[in-house]
Image (cartoon, rainbow, N blue to C red):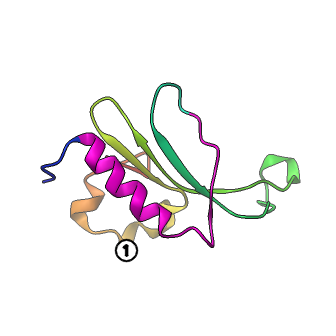
Amino acid sequence: MATGSLQEVYSDVAALLRRYVPPFQVGNLVVRGKESLQLETPKPIIVPGAYGGKPVNWQFAAAILQKGYVGFYLMGVSGLKKAISPRCGRRSRANRAFT
């Protein structure tokens, strides 16, 4: 169990995400009144069957400092369910968010 404040936890998660810049880039995630960080692809990509075939900068991961928790979002994690530890899986929400 984490013993730090939510701000400390958020800072730690954001630091972990920043380790992946590059190859990813920091995106423009705006969550009203909340501190947040988003990683996205550096160049627009085409996602088959989505966005009307238009290239987009695809969001890979995000952290959001919420009121009572730090949200950690990993896009595409639903395909990795078997690789996620049971302990981490219990913290999963909506197949891609961890609190």
Q: x, y percentage for residue 28? A: 64, 44
Q: x, y percentage for residue 22? A: 61, 71
Task: Tell me the residue that label 1 is attached to.
Answer: 83
Q: x, y percentage for residue 90? A: 25, 54
Give whichever of 48, 43 is nearer the camera: 43
Q: Image check: 82 left or right of 59?
A: left
| 43 to 7, vertically: above or below | below
Which residue is pictured at 32% across the width and 56% down the height? 12
Q: Which residues are magenta?
A: 6-30
Give whichever of 58, 19 is nearer the camera: 19
Which residue is pictured at 45% across the width and 69% down the height? 80
Which residue is pictured at 59% across the width and 35% down the height? 30
Q: x, y percentage for residue 40? A: 64, 58
| 73 to 30, vertically: above or below | below
As shown in the figure, which amino acid type bears the numbered disc 1? Answer: Ala
Give whichever of 92, 45 is nearer the camera: 45
Quadrant where the N terminus sits is bottom left
Any magenta on residue 19?
yes
Q: Image check: 51 left or right of 87?
A: right
| 96 to 23, vertically: above or below | above
| 6 to 47, vertically: above or below | above
